[in-house]
Structures are given as C-alpha cells and as structure tokens.
Amino acid sequence: MSNAAEPRHPSTAPDWWKSAVVYQVYPRSFQDSDGDGIGDLRGILQRLDHLERLGVDVVWLSPIYRSPQADNGYDISDYHDIDPVFGTLADFDELLAAMHARGIRLVMDLVVNHTSDEHPWFVESRASRDSAKRDWYWWRPPRPGARGGDPGAEPTNWESFFSGPTWEWDEATGEYFLHLFDRKQPDLNWENPEVRTAVYEMMRWWLDRGVDGFRMDVINLISKHPGLPDGPVRDGKRYGDGSASYVNGPRLHEFLQEMHREVFDGRDGLITVGETPGVTVDDAVLFTDPARREVDMVFQFEHVGLDHGVSKFRPRPLEPGELAASLAKWQDGLRETGWNSLYLENHDQPRSVSRFGDADEHWYGSATALATMLHLMRGTPYVYQGQELGMTNAPFSVIDEYRDIESLNAYAEEVASGTAVADALYGLSLMSRDHARTPVQWDASPNAGFTSGEPWLPVNPNHDRINAADQAGDPGSVFEYYRALIALRHERPVVGHGSFERADAGHPAIFAYERVHGAERLLVVANLSSAEHAPAFDLDLAARWTTGAGEPGDVPILTNTIPDSPAPFDAPLAPWEARVYAAGA
Ligand code: ISL
C-alpha cells in the first residue's frame, strides 16, 4: 500500500484521466456510520482503505446535496448544502481532504437538468404567474380547448422517463410544468440566462471548495426545442416520444461551451463527464473533441440498451457477440478524436455479472472476463461500488422489496394496463435499478458490515460468500483481479494512450483486440461465453504475435484462469477465460 502522505498519481498532464480509473460511490448504499440504515459521508471515510488498496484515482460521488430523496438525491432542494441523512459540510470537507491526502480525486454529481420541486427556485416559480422566477422552469397552459388536469390536456403528449406524462398540472396558477423525470423533478429552463448564471456560480462554489470535477446528470437534455412539439406515439404506447425535442437540443453545444468558459477555464487537473442518453458516436465526437472545449468524456448508452425489448422492463437475451460489437463500434468511432467512458454498471443498471455474465455457473470467470474486456479498451474505466467484488442482482420476488421510483412507477403502470403481476415482476427481477443499490457487501456478518441498524434496502443474502473481507488479499478473488487490471493501466502507457484494433475473426463469443502505442503492444483475448471456443485471428495479427516458444507473445501477463497457465495466444479458451499478452515494452 502506498504512503498516505504521498499521492500516488500526481500527474498534472491535461489528459491525466486517460490513465485513470474512476470508482462510483452511491452513498446511500456504501457504508452507514450512524446506524440509521442509510450510508453516509463518515461511512465513506471509514472505507477509504478499500479504495486506496483497489488503486482507483477518482471517486465520483452520487448526489449528497440536500434533497427530499424522491429519486435518492437526484432531486436537489439546496445545491450548497449536504443532506442531513449523509452528514454535514464539515464532514464533506473532511472526506475531501482525506481523499486528497491519499491521492484520490473527488468528482461531484451535477444535477442541473432539473431541481426538486422543493427547491426555493421552484417554490418561487410556482407561487404565481408573475413570479420573477416563473420563467426559470417550463410552464405551459393546457392544450387549446382542453380543461387543465383532464387526461390528454397536457401541453405535449410526451412520456416521462419514469412513466406517465411529462407534465404536472398546477391548479393554483392554472398551468402545467414540465418534468422529464418524476413530478418532483421539474426541468429548469436553460433558455433563461439567469438560470445558467446561477448554475455556473454554484459549480464554481464547489470547485473553490476543492472538488476535482463533475459528472453531469443527463446533461444532453438541458436544451429543449422551444416549440415543444408533440412526439410520435409508438406501437403499444399510450404517450408520445418527445426525445427529438430534448435529446441533444438546438442550443446544447452552445450551453456546454459557455459552461466551459464560465466555470472551467483557467482551472487545471479537473475531469468532466457528461451523462448523455441517446447520444450517437458522431455526437460523442463533438462533445469530447478537446478543441471544442465541452466535456472530457461522455457516458453513452448503446451497450446498456442492447437488451431492452419493447421497453426496458421487457428485456431480450443478447446474441453472442452483440455486446462486443457495440463496444468495438464506439472504439472505432472515437479512434481519431474524442474520448469515451468505459462502464458496464452504475446505480441505474443491473449488475453486470448477472446481466452480461453467468452468475450461476461461471461467477468468477465472467466477472473477471468482462472486467478484462472493459478495462483494457481505449477510454476511462468506471468501477461501480461492489462491481470489484462481483456483486450480483438481488433476489427480490415481491414488489414490496423494491424502493426505486422508476421500478415502482413502471410496475404500477404495467399492472394498471393489464400486464400480469408475475410478468411485471419478472421484468423488475432482471432490470430494476435496485439491483445496483443493495448495500455493499463488506463482510459475512448479518448486515454485511454495512450498518448496525436496519438497511434501507435489504442486503443480498449471498454476502456470506461474496464480500470484501474474504476477497482482499486473496489472489484468486475478483477484487484482486480488478486491482491488477487497474495497476496495468497505471503502469503501461499503451492502456491509456494506445490505439485500438479489433483482432478476432472467428467465433462471435471471442472478443480480441490489440492496443499499440509506439513499440508497446497489448493483445487481449476474452471468451465471453459459457462454452469453450478456439479463437481465430486475422493473418496480420497471427504474424505479429506468433513469436515461438518462450517469446513474450506466448505468455500472458495477466489471465483470469486459476491457477495461471502459460498459453499461446491462439490456444482454445475455457468458458469466460480471458488472457492479456504484452510485447515491445
Ligand atoms: O435509469 C434509466 C434507465 O431507464 C434512465 O432512464 C435514467 O433515468 C437516465 O439514464 C438518467 O439517469 C440519471 O438521471 C435521473 C436519475 O434518476 C438517475 O439516477 C441518473 O443517473 C434523473 O436525475
């Protein structure tokens, strides 16, 4: 372990984040310090050894601001304070200093597409039609000829991300307000320059406090087409799809460039990542081209939408190779310009070993093969809390076990529209956001070491065999494998800076790619299936990596098989086997 007094990664290169790994903390579920069953800032402080040992460079903290917690903090009522459930500003300052002392940077979640309906800005906005802040949000009269509050009277036909219409009727002032998410999350009107000024001021306030950047929640939804036209109603849907009016809206790039000028200019060492649902490769190039001065990288959604069927909660099984094909497409698209985030999990997604791997038959193999595939691509990897332990989906079977607003709303809507309860529950059992939100499994004790009280969401019963205490220091653990992968990125410039070339030409379940940086080369070969397969490669690659017995190309520098067995790069792969070869360094 490194000396806490000497930061391990003091790089001040403008693109330091290319060789960095980010760890996401969802504070509610990370570590409780006061026994109320909800994780908090002092809990994070207690677990910094775990993060330092893992070797991550940056922590992205999901929202800790004051909030009614309708969407677990993504509904903010005061941007300048900490919610009492998480602690105080003094706790925050202590945590930030402790992270910096260990060489770990801290990124805040920036939620400025919307506020809570309890934010003073919105309270003032809704007070009257003449309020000075009326125009800070999107207020509209009912559809012409319709009576406000009646079904179908909404100003547009758009469906909310969280089910139902995007408009909430306000009886007192006789208008609707827009909320792309829950009714407790009214959308800010970025057309109004006062809104933008207030947001930039708040961002500078946090940077002045010492934070190292922002993860920007649904930042590509902030610019709306001011005409707010109806969207197409797709088959089987009750409401319209308004996304053409608010995904990558007309002034988005202007707003991001303005934000950059107003907030980030003249400050070094920061990291910014835009969460951008619906973004295409071409859009992503624009957002992340350094010359355009918008954001450093984006979270794109293509690979986490592949298994969505008619809706997220009616998923379909993936074909072999689909995941790799999507990820490789993004590698190609950003090969010249721009930068991507690499992620399989976050607080909105099911656990990757349950979703893309084989949690029953090949738990260790699939957790580590997926990690290998992800971490050694071009981009900045994100580890979501518990992913480094191979945490799995929760075994919830009744609706009362779920807490997430998206899951509860979708379930209510499905059942109301005639879906059988068992079918609605099946969808949640695969796709609910709560799978990512069960408490981190620290040890095998009754509440997994998360809390001395009653956890706000049940601990996964498999914490008796999947937990950090068992894994740290065990060379055959998922945790130690993640640690080795993270170290590779730090030690080998080719991981952060090399080119990407897909190399496999055989069975679709094999994903192989080559990374090249000057004389340094890396070859990753991963079997993303539960069957044995022999790889096949294009001829050029075979010529480069067939070096003869005892040469570097014959011996993997990292393999997830236990025990390690030297194997030539074209040897058949066991189910979920992954190997990494290096040359030229
Ligand atoms: O979770 C989703 C899958 O259905 C998305 O629709 C998700 O809501 C979307 O990715 C935006 O997510 C972000 O903003 C939401 C918040 O609920 C999510 O937790 C956050 O990551 C609203 O602030």
Image (cartoon, helix red, strand yellow):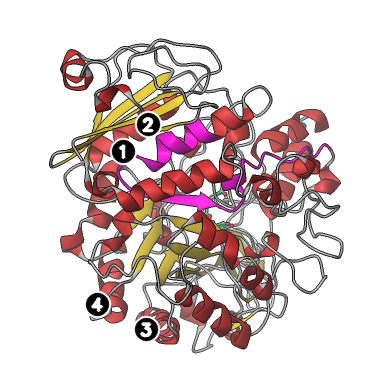
- Dot 3 falls on a residue whose secondary structure is helix
| Image mark for residue 197 | 3
Which residue appears at 41% of the width and 74% of the height?
A: 6
In terms of depth relative to the viewer, which is nearer, 376 or 314? 376
Residue 547, how many percent across, how many down?
20, 19
Q: Is residue 101 left or right of residue 47?
A: left
Assign ligand 1 to one image quadrant: bottom right
Q: Write the residue at 56% across / 72% down.
A: 115
Q: Does 388 lie within the magenta span?
A: yes
Residue range corresponding to the magenta coloring: 368-397
Sequence-first tag of 3 and 2: 3
Residue assigned mark 4? 261
Query: Residue 451 magenta-drawn?
Result: no
Q: Residue at x 22, y 43 (%)?
A: 498
Does residue 453 appear anywhere in the picture?
yes
* Marks 2 & 1, CB-CB < 8 Å contact: yes
Q: Nearer the viewer, mark 4 or mark 2?
A: 2
- State the separation of the CA atoms marked 4 and 1: 28 Å
Camera-near label (4 vs 1) is 1
- Closest to the observer, 38 or 551: 551
Please give the label number shown on residue 326: 2
Per the rendering, the mark at residue 330 is: 1
